[in-house]
Image: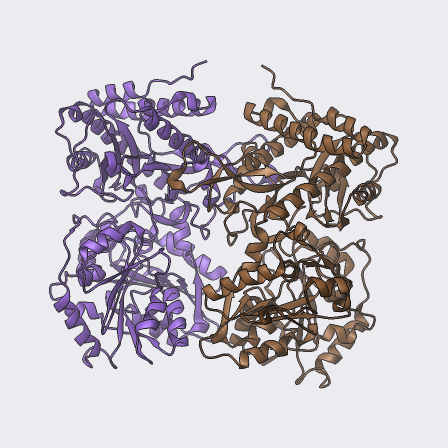
Chain colours: A purple, B brown
Amino acid sequence: MRHQLGERRQRAGRKMSSKVTTELLKQLRQVMRSSKHVTEPIQAYIVPSGDAHQSEYIAPCDCRRAFISGFDGSAGTAIITEQNAAMWTDGRYFLQAASQMDNNWTLMKMGVKDTPSQEDWLVSVLPEGSRVGVDPFIIPADQWKRMSKVLRSAGHALVPVSENLIDVVWVDRPHRPCKPLITLGLSYTGVGWKEKITILRLKMAERKVPWFVVTALDEVAWLFNLRGSDVEYNPVFFAYAIIGINSISLFIDGDRMTDPAVREHLQLDSTLEPEFKIQVVPYESILTELQAICAGLSPKEKVWLTDKASYALTEAIPKVHRYLTPYTPICMGKAVKNEAETAGMRRAHIKDAVALCELFNWLEKEVPKGTVTEISAADKAEEFRSQQNDFVELSFATISSTGPNGAIIHYKPVPETNRTLSVSEIYLLDSGAQYKDGTTDVTRTMHFGTPSAYEKECFTYVLKGHIAVSAAIFPNGTKGHLLDSFARSALWDTGLDYLHGTGHGVGSFLNVHEGPCGISYKTFADEPLEAGMVVSDEPGYYEDGSFGIRIENVVLVIPAETKYNFKNRGSLTFEPLTLVPIQTKMIDVHLLTQKECDWVNNYHQKCREVIGAELERQGRHEALQWLLKETGPIARMH
Amino acid sequence: MRHQLGERRQRAGRKMSSKVTTELLKQLRQVMRSSKHVTEPIQAYIVPSGDAHQSEYIAPCDCRRAFISGFDGSAGTAIITEQNAAMWTDGRYFLQAASQMDNNWTLMKMGVKDTPSQEDWLVSVLPEGSRVGVDPFIIPADQWKRMSKVLRSAGHALVPVSENLIDVVWVDRPHRPCKPLITLGLSYTGVGWKEKITILRLKMAERKVPWFVVTALDEVAWLFNLRGSDVEYNPVFFAYAIIGINSISLFIDGDRMTDPAVREHLQLDSTLEPEFKIQVVPYESILTELQAICAGLSPKEKVWLTDKASYALTEAIPKVHRYLTPYTPICMGKAVKNEAETAGMRRAHIKDAVALCELFNWLEKEVPKGTVTEISAADKAEEFRSQQNDFVELSFATISSTGPNGAIIHYKPVPETNRTLSVSEIYLLDSGAQYKDGTTDVTRTMHFGTPSAYEKECFTYVLKGHIAVSAAIFPNGTKGHLLDSFARSALWDTGLDYLHGTGHGVGSFLNVHEGPCGISYKTFADEPLEAGMVVSDEPGYYEDGSFGIRIENVVLVIPAETKYNFKNRGSLTFEPLTLVPIQTKMIDVHLLTQKECDWVNNYHQKCREVIGAELERQGRHEALQWLLKETGPIARMH
């Protein structure tokens, strides 16, 4: 699935009528002046789109920017002053934002020349000596720093407002979700939570840091081998943790700790070594607990936190005690899948391929009848997936798009745009699921009639790019962004390109997008690829108004054997975990090299063997026939 | 020529005996306590390796770190405290630094685990509340900021010491060079200096910045269409400039402004529009002039400066008035060569190729006799180059290396290491020159006997990488670092690699290394490649103790025609300016694709046509015969 930094998908169909916000803004401006809510009046209030954990996907209760403005795209920041209300968003959302917001709002088109930055705009509209408020839990510390600097140098002040002012005016704001937890045994995780804590403490000891604050939801989930369903598509739950050298505090709400399975999993009622005894603390007390810890620190003691954490938590740690890193050891540990996780990912991808073989076989029969729409195809995909063992939910909102809709990279079908699949248009399906043993994410582009020569040509360039990454051999220590151009070379040669990155890290029954690795020209802060990491390989080509093409596999980083082993550094390559046929009908074989041809045939042979056996086992004979038909060898003419 | 950030070459042969520094350090420590030189005693003094312009190559008077320590490698920072003297340098220089320094010095191996950073080390050895001194003109502002922060948080202070304390104890310190200037007419520069100033002022007006400080030596030289010879290999002169909307100040010393040619070039004695009247000011008065300008600024007025400038100049501008950018408009303008500059670069490369054809023809005859050494080959190359029209000097110290010396990437032959060329070893020559019309930089790797199959194999992978970059087609807006992996792919496939970047920007009768573009996995702050930019393409392979291979052309970025022109973005590719045969004897033709074979043959055909004609014109018939012999077509077996 295509990843754009900060992208977020919501199931709710896109409302294209504008929200009336006059009364809401009036209320908010009253609150901005009210001594009940702010110590001194503020002249501007910033509403970023995020939650207190800097999550990519957020829960309905955290959709504050969408609530106040009506604009529910994945990226955007609202700023409300006494006179103005402005929304910054990027090119993907100009149309959507314009149609969802009423004329109280000014759209600030990011990336367009002459659009002021939020800071510069504030400086231009604010009266002298203004106070600009923001929820310190929602704004990341680095963003606070940048904004605060500009505002201060113009004579204003950025101030933390501890009560969220949107929540004050949001009468029917949903509750923070508090759904039951799932415990994961060793067969899924490979490593118990106590061992993970021990490894973390070793890293802390190495750096002489006695405290570690876990703020990202997927890091809390991974560390304790627990999963939740508080956020759609992401099997996480609202929680923080603070790990000391001799203590563990888990900040979590609700009655989730009364579940006997959870109590047993966390050994809450056992006699444990004191350093593994988990203190369960209310979610909201993270700040006071952290402050209490900091108050007791000796001068040289530090507290470890990611530099992406909120301003509130970062600021709670006095500067001399802060130990910030871009990626935490948990993030690194989570990214490198162990044997149990790898085996789980393989199983999940086999099941996922079974579901897709069923789907594509069904589509091939149904599409010509003219009865299948983008939405019904997506629903059918979910239905087939849900038949598989350990299926939990989808891993993101299915991108099911045909014809011109395929060229909208972040398309999700809604009734207003829903198009019927036909034998004359390309169909692009980007979908995935959460299984208890792994997370999947696969894109296939199909034609159910006869593709044009141009469509085949473009598809083949995309395929060449996909293969170039998948078959690449590179030294240990190589960062993923150095592989991005391999995916584009064939397109570039004919003057084509795609305007998104090539791949993202994938979690193991966790977020479908995770750090610290990826394959993108945009990312330079990525960590080197390591054996055991899992990323997507998804080049594409999009012809505005006509069609979209993307070929995506999830691939596992594995050691590669090379002829020479330069300075004993060792080499790496990729093994596809996704085993779903690539439609050979779409390939212009003459454009492939012999090596690329062999890659396709070997890949399809593996699909036959592995997925064929599973289809057989599950008694899905018709889908098996489809698989065999789709995976016949291709050959270059001589 | 291989570029490593901060690398610097000195002609002086490397002295491998250590310098006795006991007395010197004693004197320096006295100065550090003396109220004659410091307002309050300092407990540590930092000696970076650089000059006041953050130049890559420095003049002898600026080699202060080498003077105080004996270590004259291109990269290193010395810190002297009351008790200790320590030298930080990187892996290239561990052996050299260890042998050049006496036991007053501790070698701090950068990149080695447990080596403390300079700041951390200072914190660990200094008594409480120490003052750490540094010459504010030598330390870049960003480095000051980083160090100062750490020291301050540990209770120490980083303080600027305006008198350079090394200069106090350096009795026979050479004078700052003050050599005559060369004026360049329109046929070389294409654009007059007044027009360049006008363009700069337009950029200043766009950003509403009324003042611009030119600090880099090559930027001053380019802006005024002047060249000098104050720094070896770099045709620059010591100067600063401050450009206002209505004024021009040139800070330069000596009697260089009495030269009638220079006076006429700068129209110093003409009646000019006042905004083009150049005020000539002493070099040393830059700081006071800048302070005077800043004192007269209205609240919103800013002064533009590169963020790489010295702490002294940056600090002279009050924070609210600072306008810092990574690259200046001069740097950008200088990088994109205009028609006259491109034509000059072509001419320079033709002359350079003539010299190298002569050299290689001569080597082929002489090497078997056993009378040619690395040094004599380098001298011969210089001799042939100096016969060419408009030759000025070399553009860097020639890397002439045979056998195992070729594997030392930063090798320069000195008498102690000088090796005789033979028919049994690979010879690598990386060399270039300054001509009045352009700068060259070329590497060729030759065998004068019969290369082994392994040597040919490695050479061919390097060649494939060279071609992959040279023939790459990529969209407008692509940054050079995204092409770096193309150069490595063939090596990576067999588990080989090289540990340096692939290319650097090249000046037009200016520095052989210049920003803002390049092709390296290490650089992320590079600006996108643009038609008219000139970079090197120089992958390599180095087998420690055996041989080194590098194939380097200087290439010009040119527009490319593509089949489809994605979103009208336009595409770019490279045209080799260097036209020197690539030794076909070293190629394993079976490892090339047909496309690569064609590339070699087309390249050699162009060498024949262009260089052949010039050899003919110069009456160099023997070298012409050599060229024809070396550029015969190669063919893959079928």
Residue A293, horizontal then vertical, whole percent: 36, 72
Front in this rendered view, residue B128 or B269 = B269
Q: Where is residue A32 in the image (x, y as percent from the top left)?
A: 21, 75
Farthest-out residue, front: B271
Q: Name the foreground residue: A460 vs A393.
A: A460
Asked if residue A427 can be seen in this view, the reply is yes
Q: Can residue B104 be seen in this view?
A: no
Which of the 4 quarters of the picture holds residue B41?
A: bottom right
Q: Where is residue A377 in the image (x, y as percent from the top left)?
A: 18, 34
Q: Which residue is drawn at 67% across and 50% down?
A: B188
The x, y position of residue B16, in whole percent, is 80, 55
In the picture, measured across the screen, residue B153 lies left or right of residue B237, that is left
Identify the image quadrant of residue B581: top right
Residue found at x 19% / y 79%:
A34
**Residue in the picture at 54% in, 42% down:** B484
B440 displayed left or right of A368: right
- The image quarter in which residue B365 lies: top right
Q: In this view, does A568 lie above or below A286?
A: above
Q: Is residue A170 left or right of residue B254?
A: left
Q: Nearer the viewer, residue B486 or B564?
A: B564
> Where B515 sits versus B588, above or below?
below
Classify the position of the N terminus of chain A by image quarter.
Answer: top left
Count of labels in the image: 0
In the depicted structure, whether residue B604 falls above or below residue A196: above
Q: Is residue B308 left or right of residue B225?
A: left
* Nearer to us in this view, A208 or A399: A399
